[in-house]
C-alpha cells in the first residue's frame, strides 16, 4: 500500500464550478500537509500548507485536513481556466522527506 | 532569475551513455533533492542531501549517482543510461527548518533514452 493515495483523474469541470481534490494516507505520523500545483512542462509549486487538522483558506482555495480519517482535501471555488493544472498532495512527519500523491489532472473549461 | 535552475532542460541520449543533470539554487537552502516523475507514478525520490557532506539514497537510487559540489550545486548522473530511465527529472531544495520540509522545485529536465 502506498503511503499516499490520490485519485489521478483526469477531472474536467466548467468555469465557475467548485472543485474538490482529495488524498488519503496511511501514516498517522504525518502532520504537515501541502498541496502543490504543477502546470504543464513546469516544476511543482507550493500552493497551500497546513499543519495538523483543520482548515486553511487562501482566496479561492481551501485546504482541509482530517487526521482522524487520514484524509485531506483541496477545494477550489469559482474555478478558472488558469486553474487547469495537475495538483499534487504532499505530506511529512516533520523535518523529513515529503511523500507525494501521484497528482490529479484538472481541466477547467471556459 | 529563477531560484532553482536545472540544465539541460531537454536531453535525448542513447542506451549506455553517461549523462549528468545539473542543479543550482540561489535560495541558500542546505537541503537538495532529485526526483523523477513518471505518468501514473508521481514524484519518486532518487537521492537527497541535507548538507554538502551528507548524501542519502531515496526510493529509487539504483542506476543513479549524485555529487554535491557546493551548498548551491547538486548533480545527478546516470552512469549507463537505459530506456526505462526516460522521465522528467526535478531538482528541489528546502531549508528543513521549523518542523516542515516545504520544497521548492526547479523547472525540470526531460530526458529521453533511446
Image (cartoon, coloured by chain):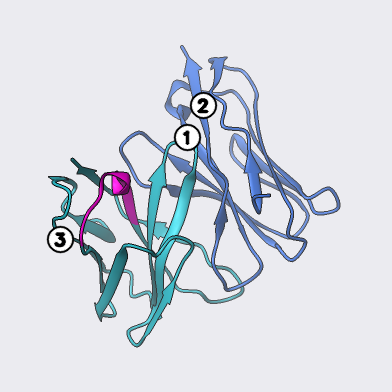
Chain colours: A blue, B cyan
Label 1: state its secondary structure.
strand
Mark 1 sits on what residue? A86
Give the Cα separation between the discs numbered 2 and 1.
Answer: 6 Å
Mark 3 sits on what residue? B18
Residue A35 coordinates in the image, percent (x, y): 56, 47
Q: Is disc 3 surrounded by few (<14), some (14 to 19) or many (20+) residues within 10 Å?
A: few
Residue B57 coordinates in the image, percent (x, y): 43, 72
Give the Cα separation between the discs numbered 1 and 3.
Answer: 31 Å
At 63% from the left and 27% from the top, the residue drawn is A77
Mark 1 and mark 3 residues within 8 Å of each other at the beta carbon:
no
At 34% from the left and 54% from the top, the residue drawn is B90
Q: Is residue B82 above or below residue B65?
A: above
Q: Is disc 2 surrounded by few (<14), some (14 to 19) or many (20+) residues within 10 Å?
A: many
Label 2: state its secondary structure.
strand
- The range drawn in magenta is B80-90
Near-viewer residue (B86 or B105)? B86
Q: Is B74 inside the magenta-drawn segment?
A: no
Mark 2 and mark 1 residues within 8 Å of each other at the beta carbon:
yes
Chain letter for mark 2: A
Mark 2 sits on what residue? A106
Q: Residue furthest bottom?
A: B53
Residue A37 coordinates in the image, percent (x, y): 47, 41
Among the 4 quarters of the image, the one containing residue A94: bottom right
Q: Which mark is residue B96?
A: none
Chain letter for mark 3: B
At 33% from the left and 75% from the top, the residue drawn is B28
Going by the image, does A64 lie left or right of B3? right
Near-viewer residue (A1 or A82)? A1
Amino acid at each position: 500500500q502506498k503511503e499516499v493515495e490520490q485519485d489521478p483523474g483526469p477531472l474536467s469541470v466548467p468555469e465557475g464550478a467548485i472543485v474538490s481534490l482529495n488524498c488519503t494516507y496511511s501514516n498517522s505520523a504525518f502532520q504537515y500537509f501541502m498541496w502543490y500545483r504543477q502546470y504543464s512542462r513546469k516544476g511543482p509549486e507550493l500552493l497551500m500548507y497546513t499543519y495538523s487538522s483543520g482548515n486553511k483558506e487562501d482566496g479561492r482555495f481551501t485546504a482541509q485536513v482530517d487526521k482522524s480519517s487520514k484524509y485531506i482535501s483541496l477545494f477550489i471555488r469559482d474555478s478558472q481556466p488558469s486553474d487547469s493544472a495537475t495538483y499534487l498532495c504532499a505530506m511529512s512527519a516533520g523535518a523529513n522527506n515529503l511523500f507525494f500523491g501521484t497528482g490529479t489532472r484538472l481541466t477547467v473549461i471556459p | 532569475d529563477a531560484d532553482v535552475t536545472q540544465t539541460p532542460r531537454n536531453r535525448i541520449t542513447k542506451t549506455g551513455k553517461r549523462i549528468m543533470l545539473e542543479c543550482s539554487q540561489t535560495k541558500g537552502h542546505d537541503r537538495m533533492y532529485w526526483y523523477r516523475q513518471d505518468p501514473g507514478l508521481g514524484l519518486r525520490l532518487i537521492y537527497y542531501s541535507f548538507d554538502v557532506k551528507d548524501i542519502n539514497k531515496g526510493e529509487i537510487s539504483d542506476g543513479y549517482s549524485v555529487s554535491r559540489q557546493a551548498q548551491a550545486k547538486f548533480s545527478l548522473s546516470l552512469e549507463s543510461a537505459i530506456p526505462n530511465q526516460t522521465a522528467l527529472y526535478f531538482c528541489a531544495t528546502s531549508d528543513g527548518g521549523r518542523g516542515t520540509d516545504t520544497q521548492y522545485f526547479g523547472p525540470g529536465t526531460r530526458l529521453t533514452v533511446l
